[in-house]
Image (spheres, helix red, strand yellow):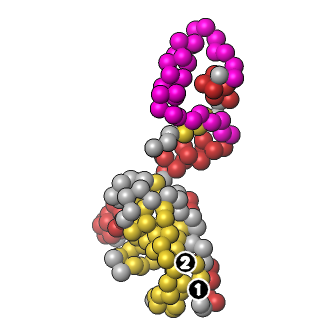
Amino acid sequence: MRLIVESDCRLVVDWLNGAVDPPPYISSKVRSLKGLLSDWGWTVRWIPRVGNTAADQLAKEGIGCKFCRTHLALPDDIVSKSFHSRRGKAYLFNNAVNITIGTLEERMMLSGMHTVADIFCCCCGQIVGWKYEAAHEKSQKYKEGKFVLERGRIVDENDSSSEVYIDTRPSMSDGED
Ligand SMILES: [Zn+2]
């Protein structure tokens, strides 16, 4: 196993990599961290702040694998929530991360023939949906390169509220009437 530590603070990275000497008040902490790094073979890298922001957003808002909670997608990337799989409701996403892509196959779907590949969580290997490589019908071309994640195989922290919303709405409008 290899661990890569990324920080957007160039000074801390320089301290840990030995490029710059740390100030005395923190030198003992830096020394013990450097000890850990050499013992375990960690790598410390500087990354631009925008990289950290993306990782942070994914950690806070990400839609995760139901089985191992690895982050698979962002709610902002949802194109449609009205997709269906053999196992129930599914969402269409512009993008998905931390997945492995299976073999391409031709599959007949509700909206016609598509070239698709099943997608799997890269961490636990569970199937989580599929990717559209190609759509044979013109009206379905918008799906190409996009990903479907099955509702029953993902955990969406933001979605529990919308499910409550759907459940409570009818009784609310009943009351108003
Ligand atoms: Zn998983």
Along the horizontal axis of the image, is 131 left or right of 142? left
Going by the numbered disc 2, the residue's amino acid type is: Tyr
Q: Which residues are magenta?
A: 19-48
Relative to 132, is 164 above or below?
A: above
- The image quadrant that residue 76 belongs to is bottom right
Which residue matches tag 2?
132
Badges 2 and 1: C-beta atoms under 8 Å apart?
Answer: yes
Say few, some or many: other residues with alpha carbon within 10 Å of mark 2 (under 14 / 14 to 19 / 20 or more): many
| SS label for mark 1 | strand
Relative to 142, is 58 above or below?
A: above
Going by the numbered disc 1, the residue's amino acid type is: Ala
**Which image quadrant: the C terminus?**
bottom left
Relative to 41, is 16 above or below?
A: above
Relative to 42, is 158 above or below?
A: below
- Residue 130 shows in the view: no
Closer to us: 132 or 31: 31
**Which image quadrant: the N terminus?**
top left
The spot of residue 12 in percent (x, y) is 62, 25
Distance from disc 2 to disc 1, alpha carbons, whole Å, reads 7 Å
Which residue matches tag 1?
135
Q: Residue at coordinates 54% horizontally, 84% vertically from top-left?
A: 115
Q: Residue at coordinates 37% horizontally, 65% vertically from top-left?
A: 126
Closer to us: 139 or 26: 26
Q: Residue at coordinates 58% horizontally, 8% vertically from top-left?
A: 25
- The image quadrant that residue 132 belongs to is bottom right
Q: Residue at coordinates 56% horizontally, 46% vertically from top-left?
A: 55
The spot of residue 159 in percent (x, y) is 41, 59
Total marks drawn? 2
- Residue 84 shows in the view: yes
The spot of residue 46 in percent (x, y) is 65, 35
